[in-house]
Image (cartoon, rainbow, N blue to C red):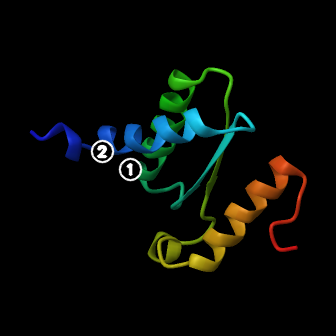
Amino acid sequence: MNVTKSPASRVLQTVVPAAGLSRTETIAAVLGTDPISSGVAFSEGFALDTRYVNPEIEVIATHHPGDPSIAFKDPNWGAATARQAWDQKTGSNANA
């Protein structure tokens, strides 16, 4: 098995830079729907791995509220949710 292709490795490849580069001690994840078990596992793994790298970091994880058939086909929701997480932490408005 190629470790660099495993789901856990992909999470760590995302988490380590994000947790290490955060100037606000916060990172956000915009995710698929809750009912998908792999999405929940990724979300929980993302949060645990992030806190392993930086125990003080806050993780904002938001799952798509819609049906799984549209969760990964809704870029407008993804962009708006990412902006909302940014605004929530920085107190600014990314649209301004």
Determine which of the numbered discs, if any, sits on residue 7 in the image. 2
Label 1 residue SS? helix
Q: Is residue 2 left or right of residue 53?
A: left
Neighbours of disc 2 within 10 Å: few (<14), some (14-19), many (20+): few
Q: Mark 2 is on which residue type? A: Pro
User: In the image, 2: left or right of 81?
Assistant: left
| Tag 2 near tag 1, CB within 8 Å | yes
Residue 75 position within the rendered picture, expressed as x and y whole percent measured from the top left: 57, 77
Q: Is residue 51 above or below residue 85?
A: above
**Helix, strand or loop for disc 2:** helix
Disc number placed over residue 38 in the picture, else none = 1
The mark that comes first in sequence, 2 or 1, is 2
On the image, the x and y values in percent for residue 33 come to 53, 60
Q: Residue at x 49, y 56 (%)?
A: 35
Amino acid on which disc 1 is placed = Ser
**Residue 90: x and y, percent?**
84, 50
Q: Is residue 18 left or right of residue 62?
A: left
13 up-or-down from 36: above or below: above
In the visual, does 65 lie left or right of 40?
Answer: right
Q: Quadrant of the N terminus?
A: top left
Residue at the spot 44% in from the left edge and 45% down from the top edge: 14
